Amino acid sequence: MNMYLHELKSMRRSTLIWTCAMIALAALYFSVYRGIVSDAAGFKRLLGGYPEPVRAALGISIDNITSLLGFYSMIFSFVTLCGAIQAMNLGASVLSKEVRERTADFLLVKPVSRAAIVNAKLLAALTMIAATDLVYYLAVSLMASIVKTADYSGQVFFLINLTLFFIQLIFLAIGVAVSVFFAKLKSVLPLSLGVVFGLYMIGAIIAVGKDNTAARFISPFKYFDMTYIIKHAGYEPSYLITGAAIVAAAIAISYFIYVKKDVHAVS
């Protein structure tokens, strides 16, 4: 419990920054929503001038763009990008920071198993991600209720926002798994940005393709199709199962390697 609380304390500042950044990003876009609705025809003509591959890469659906859910699904891709970076940072640093901060020897001589250490650290990271998403959801729900020009489905709005948590879980697990392969990871930011932006760009390229059903499995950003969620009020089972399998496999690998690997403090 002490280790869990210590990890929460060490993560609270970065969590607050990421939460505020994501809320500010959503607020920036919501602030122009009513202006867009008031000139819906002109805005659709503007977007219609974009090449179709560009619209596909940005997740723009002209038919739904002026509805609150359609507009929000477009801007939500940028929010998930921020959330993925936050989760990847947490995952990559949660086990590697002891070596970076030269506290590995101090931690590992404590009368606790390595599995218990991983449990406490992962639980703390998961708590912070859940707290981020909860505060963000409450904030954007308030914004949506203020700027809406027509009724919208609260269930679908919730399902769209819930995908942020799922994507963060995937990148948290990937970050933890990747970090245990490094004996000395001096900085997690280049690793996090490289992996997240790489998969995001791959997802954008995949979206351009006509028949991309199989290719979407490559990028977690494409596991949750907003158009499908709005239309069916649910998720595509195959991608949801794939995401769960990635999380389970990555966490299992992390436990297996961390429990057995030699961990040295930086001299």
Image (spheres, helix red, strand yellow):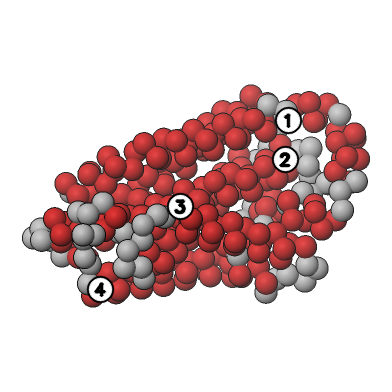
Disc 4 residue type (three-letter):
Lys
Q: Is 38 or 45 nearer to us in this picture?
A: 45
Structural distance between the alpha carbons of marks 1 and 3? 33 Å
Classed neighbour count for the residue bearing mark 3: other residues with Cα under 10 Å, few (<14), some (14–19), many (≥20): some
Residue annotated with mark 1:
33
Tag 2: amino acid = Phe
**Which is closer to the viewer, label 3 or label 4?**
3
State the SS at label 2.
helix
**Circle 1/circle 3 CB separation < 8 Å:** no
Near mark 1 (Cα within 10 A), the count class, few <14, some 14-19 or many ≥20, is many
Q: Is 9 displayed left or right of 70 in the figure?
A: left
Residue nearer the viewer, 245 or 14: 14
Judging by the rendered image, the residue that carries numbered circle 2 is 71
Instruction: Look at the numbered disc 1 and give the secondary structure of its residue.
Output: helix
- In the rendered image, residue 29, in percent from the top left (x then y), is placed at 67, 33
Q: Nearer the viewer, mark 2 or mark 4?
A: 4
Disc 2/disc 1 C-alpha distance (Å) = 8 Å
Amino acid type at mark 1: Tyr
Q: Amino acid at mark 3?
A: Leu
The residue carrying mark 3 is 189
Which of pointers 1 and 3 indicates the residue nearer the eye?
Answer: 3
Q: Which mark is residue 261?
A: 4
Among the 4 quarters of the image, the one containing residue 100: bottom left
